[in-house]
Image: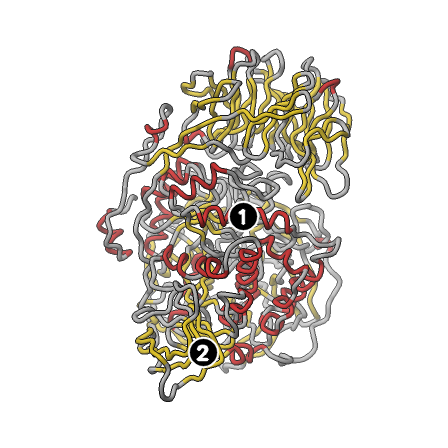
Amino acid sequence: MELSRRELLTRTGQAAAVATAASTLTIGAAQAESGGGAGVKLTQGTNISVARSRDGKWLAIDLVTAIWVLPAAGGEARKLTDELQDATLPSFGPGNEIAFQSYRDGNYHLYVTGLDGGTPRQLTSGKFDHREPAFSPDGTKIAFVSDRAGSYGVHVLDVKSGAITQLTGVPDEAAAPQWSADGTRIIFTVGNAAVDVVSLDGKRERLVTAPAGMQLFGAAFGPGDQPSYTQMRPGQAELMLGTTAVVTGQDVFGFAPIWDGDSVLYTADGKIQLRANGSTKDIPFVATVPVRTTRRPHRTKNLAGGVVKGIASPVVSPDGKKIAFRALNAIYLLDDGRTRKLTTGKYFDSDPDFSPDGTKLIYASDRTGVAQLRVRDLNTGDDKVFALAPHAQLMPRYSPDGTRVAYLDQDGQLWIADQQGRRQVTPTLFQPGRPTWSKDGNTVALAAVKPFSRRFREGTSQILSVDLISGELKYTEPMPFRSIATRGDDGPVWSPDGKHIAFVVESVAWVVPVDAKGNFLGEPRQVTREFTDSLAWQGNNALVYLNNGRLRRSALDGRPTTIRHDLSWRRPKAPDRKVIHVGAYWDGEAHELKKNVDIVVENGAVKEIRPHHGRADVDASSLTAIPGLIDAHNHWHLRGRQWGARQGLVWLAYGVTTVRSPGDPVYQMIETREALAAGALVGPRFYATGEAVDGSRVYYNFMRPTLTRAQLDLELRRAHELDYDMIKTYVRLPVDLQRAAVQRSQVPLSSHYLYPAANIGMDGMEHVGATNRLGYSHTITRQGRAYQDVVALFASSGMSMTPTLFQSRALYDKDKSLATDERTRVLYPPWEYERNLADANNQGTPAGTWSRAILQGWVEFALKVHRGGGFVICGTDAPLDSPAVATHMNLRALVEYGFTPREALITATRNPAKWLGLPLGTIKPGVPADIAFVEGDPLTDIKAAANVKQVMVGGQLHRVADLLEPYRGEQPTFGAFAADLPALPSAVNKHWWHEPEWAERVCCDH
């Protein structure tokens, strides 16, 4: 259902003309693909691989996810595959055929094409990935790796018959197979930790084990059948032959080298290189690619109010007459169209559930400092803690008899509490969904991710059932190769009679008959035909759910109806006029501070800036005013329940007055956006999108698996009706659907990819080079370097780059002040503070995990883009990195390695404001009064930007001391912790993917 241009312009408030046609993506000259875009010449390639034809006349490279050929001596490259092919890792066979891997249809498959191009021929198919092909010497076979057998194993394809033979399997995670010269053996890496060889009869031998601290990539047979491979650690990449380093001091990319006697062809430092007779020469190339050089104008809306759409986690009373939910930072009860506010909204109260008799609500609240369970009597209003615990208690659900409560802690462990105590039920799970009970109370089910392999983290969101009697954990696909829509409130949800489970798949509701343990007794049946989120049963024959901000009810065999409510919101009146005397201010543009001025604020905006005279309402004469900072990449609700009301406070306490989220659970996001705008929650301005639009496999709990254009249209309709501020397309979405999203969306789009995104009209790229379906990045090398291709594409396209400098934590080796700052200590949840402090203390010791060498490369990359006319905006990926603290660590890192303090501040003020299309990031008459008041001069010392004493958002002034007050000192306690009872057998961890979300830096490990 493609939205009309008029409807989109009306609903989004855009007035500028919008491009609706995408480029024509066909094989041929580069300009044929450009749709009017400019041609950009590329003379270097970041993380390119190279192959050589059997006759030695041609080279093939995979530049900007396409296969190109050029003469072996170098020269102009000719493109063989189109942008939709998404082709990489070429391998020459006989007759100049080239095998490669392609992500064209949403899974990796093997293709071959001729030297003259034409339509490639597909060799593999199906729902598993087939990667990294290598032609055998005689051309009759192709070795490759695939997850078709439960992990990445080495397989061999007979080219003529199509038959596939598996040579290695579980528990291997094999990569990059290459043949021996006689075609009898295959060499490959295992988990980046070893090099093995396997013969065609299955005999296997380990050739190399990585030295401590090293990783191994790209194995091949060298002279004398010695193993050749790249050995890496931060700051060091060496091409090895046996135990001898033959190439050092270069950024070797880690693909299989090509040996011919004692000469070797490889890629490094952005180039194709040939080393022979002790010297190295470059093989030059030039490739021209089309780039769209104009981006659609956009102005983000500031919502003014209206009917509440941010209804989070609705549940229905046992008699079907009442609905409880979170909205505007409080718990509400809806009864016959009228809403009643049950909690004050001062803290973070969430996820209510009715007791079986309907007289009580259990919910989570952080009013004691961290989220704890509370029970509210709906008749008397009595409200008290339940089963107090030393950890967070989240997403509770009553058992059918009302004697027990299942809940999750901050690490994703499932617990059950009753009057006797609490016991752990599962090991740590990665971002699981809300639990649900079987009717007999002997089984609990919830949504959990099950990856396809350890090598690549993505999988499907399945139903994990926990037998509380036997201790068995069982994963069940909702449908083959399909995911539950999101792991939150989209199911599974057991019907009250225990006969059915409901869940959302591809944005519609399904119901399946089950036995007492949750085993499917039939095929799932689709029961809604409209956007469906956040399921709850109303009796045994109807579902209540959210539909683009509306509460809806649908009988399992009937039409949906809207459930009316009377809840609305509006922005509060702007604060009274204030005159603020500051010792100095930076307007967001100037190269020096302006001294001793009054900033007059009226109706939430700057009215006037004048030389100081007379009496001021606020004496900030010892402080410097700077524009409020903007963090343009964070995920408020990735740990939103764990952080609770603290999160908004910590952003403000560090001077961040605007945040942008490129991905969050949609109704959690909208609830928070409305609560902040309505003044019901204290925090910064919040601009955001809902779940990122992903492909057939997912990882995070807030990704939307999207497999077809029809479903993409559903996702974009949701984005439109819920007023998304942007859309993010994620790692496994194929280029064809990414292009369709650009054509259909009228809000900015961003992703993890630079090309062909720069040509199809995407507006930004997140991270210097984070999770990528390839397993590595084409924008940054493993050593943290980017080359001419990447810088030129950013500079010419105008796409934004949000670096998210995780490696900035390496700076803790010399200065830990932000990790120990009172604001961090008071406003971070205890476990977050302790983990952050431990990591900071590890830097500069052997236990440190962050690298100054890689950080320097990242910053130098960003600096080249910035000074080359590109568009760099500050963002941190918080809470994967530390909220607000990381914003300042990023700014300090920029300055440490080349940015001036002014340039760094512009990435966190003027630039992200421009991306949002909002008059923020500056202090001048007529703009919103978003101001941080700091000690010192941040234009000469960037650390001064963190010395925030007061902060203003829309004219509302906050003292940092007041922001800390709710969580300062000892938090109130309400009795002793409930007894910690022995864990159930099901709590024993038997699967490698059962780990907390924070266990590794999963955003940027690929």
Colour mode of the rendering: secondary structure
Left/right of residue 521 with respect to residue 202 in the rendered view: left
Which residue is painted at 68% across and 38% down in the image? 232
Between 234 and 939, the one nearer to me in the picture = 939
Query: Which quadrant would residue 808 be assigned to in this image?
Result: bottom right
Q: Is residue 638 above or below residue 764?
A: below
> Which residue matches tag 1?
860
| Residue topped by disc 2 | 583
Instruction: Report whether 863 appears left or right of 846.
Output: left
Examine the rendered structure and indicate whether residue 834 appears above or below residue 294: below
Q: Image quarter for residue 179?
A: top right
Disc number placed over residue 773 in the picture, else none: none
Can residue 170 be spotted in the picture?
no
Question: What residue do we see at 55% from left, 32% from top?
Answer: 129
Whichever of callouts 1 and 2 sits on the residue coming sooner in the sequence is 2
Q: Secondary structure at mark 2?
A: strand
- Mark 1, Cα crowd under 10 Å, few <14 / some 14-19 / many 20+, is some
